[in-house]
Image (spheres, coloured by chain):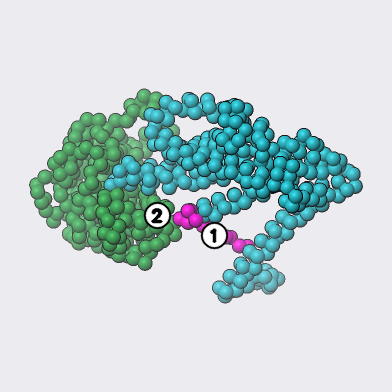
Chain colours: A cyan, B green
Amino acid sequence: MVEAVLQSNPEYQKALADQEIEARAQRAIRKRRLAVRGWQIGIFVAIFGLWELGADTGWIDPFFYASPSAVIERLVDWAQNGTTEGSLWFNLWVTMEEALIGFVIGSITGVIVGIALGRNPMLSDILSVYIKAFNSIPRVVLAPIFIMILGLGLASKVALAFIMVFFVVFANAFQGVREADRDLIANAKILGASDWQVTRSVIVPSAMSWIFASLHISFGFAIIGAIVGEFVGARFGIGQLISIAKGTFDSAGMFAAIILVMVITLFAEWIMTLIENRLAKWRPQQSIDVQ
Amino acid sequence: MQADKGGVPAIELVDVTRRFVSPTGKNLTALRDFDMSVAQGEFAAVVGPTGCGKSTTLNLVTGLARPTSGEVRLMGAPVSGIDPRVGFVFQKDALFPWKNVIDNVMAGPLFRGKSTAEAERLAKDWLTRVGLSKFLHHYPHQLSGGMRKRVSLAQTFVNEPEILLMDEPFSALDVQTRTVMHEELLNLWSERQASVVFVTHDLEEAVALADKVYVLTAGPATVKSVYKIDLPRPRVVSEIRYDPAFVKYCRTIWDDLREEVETSYRRANEAA
């Protein structure tokens, strides 16, 4: 019976050399990777092809939905001739500057305050009610206030980006501190660590994966903060471009701006992942199960 | 064999009671009227039913927990805070996962203000002694359970503790690895002659390693009886289990311990 199965299945061989097994595994990995990539490209082509086709044949109204070719045309036009508000690169830089400054200050203070409160239960008990209350305010409603107080320039957008980033990073850093392994803390203490050494060598590293998870999403939040700030009132920036495009019913312009923001955020995400992988080299790598 | 050097016991728990108050205000007694005395250079093992409060005794000696009443003394002086002479080996290995092997072992000396060069020298020395000199730059997750335990031992021993506390340190290891670790522990200990309190639920482990075995009652724990183990040293743990004297010790102590285990088991069932 077993013999029969063995013979009828030519794939099955009793003893394969290590090299052969490895070569097969490599091939399987490559095949899978190709399949994934193929589907990804296929879906991309399908969506944009349908969009273009729909716009060309009039199934969807190009006035509202634009079309991929119109969007690309607009991007090229902006890049070559500048926008109504000056050079595209300048506008892009304005938004990036606001988001980056807000992101950096927001995440640094978020981490510091999160760790400080996480290490100090009394203080965190006292302040928790205020943090909860403040956290329940949808951040974007603060935009008009910031613009009123800080003006149309950089400061109001940075403030909004900051507040969006701060709470996310703070909450994660705080949780990360709380989740730090009690045995590790006890071990460090018995090995002779002072409170500060415990914080530096146990608390911060163990909160790091929480903090990084929050940094990934919070860069997106910083961009939201900058753009919403620009919607409400600004002279330059991608948000301002979208706002103007809306005013002139320029759907291609809106989509073009959205795509720009998307590309930038993806790029930032990629850089963040690089940094994270570098810092987290101690984490176990999963071995791949190849069929 | 273990000479009582200064006459002062290394570790002393005198009439110690330790209560916990749960967040809802319920009172739980972990230890009651607990007396224990470990001479300098002596190896004491503590056995008792699960959850009876064995680990609590160790926490009291480290200074991480305070007795509700009674006194804990190290070398004759009452414990106040974490004592630098104490080393602790945890049940699950408490290595820092983000540090590699050598950095883990260097942590103790660095915390205690030694220079990096000095810490590195000590760490390398201890890692060689536990047979891991080829794994200095591996991370804990890349090592087997037995290797991680060796790193833990090096991490603790590098501080040269006079008092060594071990909380079921080998319970997560497989039987063969555990026997190897027993031998290694006894070798390290015979070089250093630290005073050891070794908590375990494994009676054979206790008899094989210790000079003295404390049997605790089902919680709240108090000392039920103390047995002196007069087996010659150096002991070969892998062979000692066939020694008739060893078997006799195990049987006698087990008869004593069984009642407590049964009580504890019955209570757990009633609670469930």
Give the amino acid at mark 1: Ser
Quarter of the figure with residue A39 = bottom right
Task: Tell me the chief SS of the magenta region.
Answer: loop
**Disc 1: CA contacts within 10 A as few (<14), some (14-19) or many (>=20):** few
Q: Position of residue B244 (x, y in %)?
A: 23, 58
A13 vs A220, nearest the viewer = A220
Q: Position of residue B217 (x, y in %)?
A: 27, 38
Residue found at x 76% / y 43%: A253
Residue designated by label 1 = A287
Instruction: Tell me the residue at 45%/55% (across/down).
Output: A282
User: In the figure, is residue A79 to the left or right of B251?
Assistant: right
Is disc 2 on the same chain as disc 1?
A: no
Mark 2 belongs to chain = B
Q: Dot 2: few (<14), some (14–19), or many (≥20) neighbours within 10 Å?
A: many
Residue mark closest to the camera, 1 vs 2: 2
- What is the quadrant of residue A150 in the picture? top right
Residue A103's place in the image compared with A45, above or below, is above
Q: Which quarter of the image is occupied by the N terminus of chain B? A: bottom left
Q: Give whichever of B2, A53 is nearer the camera.
A: A53
Q: Position of residue B177 (x, y in %)?
A: 36, 60
Q: Position of residue A110 (x, y in %)?
A: 48, 38
Label 1: state its secondary structure: loop
Q: Chain of mark 1?
A: A
Q: Tell me the residue that label 2 is attached to.
A: B99
Q: Is residue A282 magenta?
A: yes
Region of the chain picked out in magenta, as a range: A278-291
Q: Amino acid at mark 2?
A: Lys
Task: Please report the residue visible at 26 percent of the width from the left and 50 percent of the height from the top.
Answer: B112
